[in-house]
Amino acid sequence: MASTNLSALTQSHRIASLKKRAKREQVKEVVFDEDARKEFLTGFHKRKLAKKEAAKKKAIDREKQERREQRLEHRRALAEQARSNAKEVEKAYGGV
């Protein structure tokens, strides 16, 4: 897009207005919370244990899901085997 005379003349105004807006949106005061700082600094062990516990729970859930899937697959295999046995018996007795 070709730059027009108007855009060249108003570019500095746009930059100045952006700077003004940024200055207005700055944080007026920073509040320091001693309790939050202490909790952060002393909470490393607590957070580490919580993370470890969450990983254990996730592993247990994953194992439960795998066992469910294995049982389901085993049931399907048994059902398929029962169907094939029934067909063989039917064939052996000369059924339809």
Image (cartoon, helix red, strand yellow):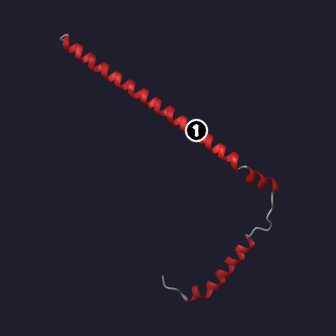
The tally of labels here is 1
Q: Nearer the viewer, residue 2 or 67?
A: 67
Residue at the outermost front position: 45
Tell me if residue 59 comes above or below residue 29 in the rendering.
above
Q: Residue 5 in the image: x percent, y percent?
A: 56, 89
Q: Residue 4 in the image: x percent, y percent?
A: 53, 87
Q: Quick one: label 1, few (<14), some, or many (20+) residues within 10 Å?
A: few
Q: Residue 6 in the image: x percent, y percent?
A: 58, 87
Residue at the outermost left position: 94
- Tell me the residue at 75%/51% (across/down): 42
- Tell me the residue at 62%/85% (across/down): 10
- Tell me the residue at 35%/22% (across/down): 78
Q: Nearer the viewer, residue 94 or 15?
A: 94
Q: Quadrant of residue 88?
A: top left
- Element on which disc 1 rests: helix
> Is residue 96 visible in the rendered structure shown here?
no
Quadrant (top left, top right, bottom left, bottom right) of the C terminus: top left
Q: Nearer the viewer, residue 61 or 85?
A: 61
Q: Quadrant of residue 61?
A: top right
Tell me if residue 83 comes above or below residue 73 in the rendering.
above
- Tell me the residue at 43%/26% (across/down): 71
* Residue at which label 1 appears: 56
Q: Residue 73 in the image: x percent, y percent?
A: 39, 28
Question: Amino acid under label 1?
Answer: Lys
Residue at the outermost top position: 93
Q: Quadrant of residue 30?
A: bottom right
> Is residue 61 visible in the rendered structure shown here?
yes
Q: Is residue 26 left or right of residue 54?
A: right
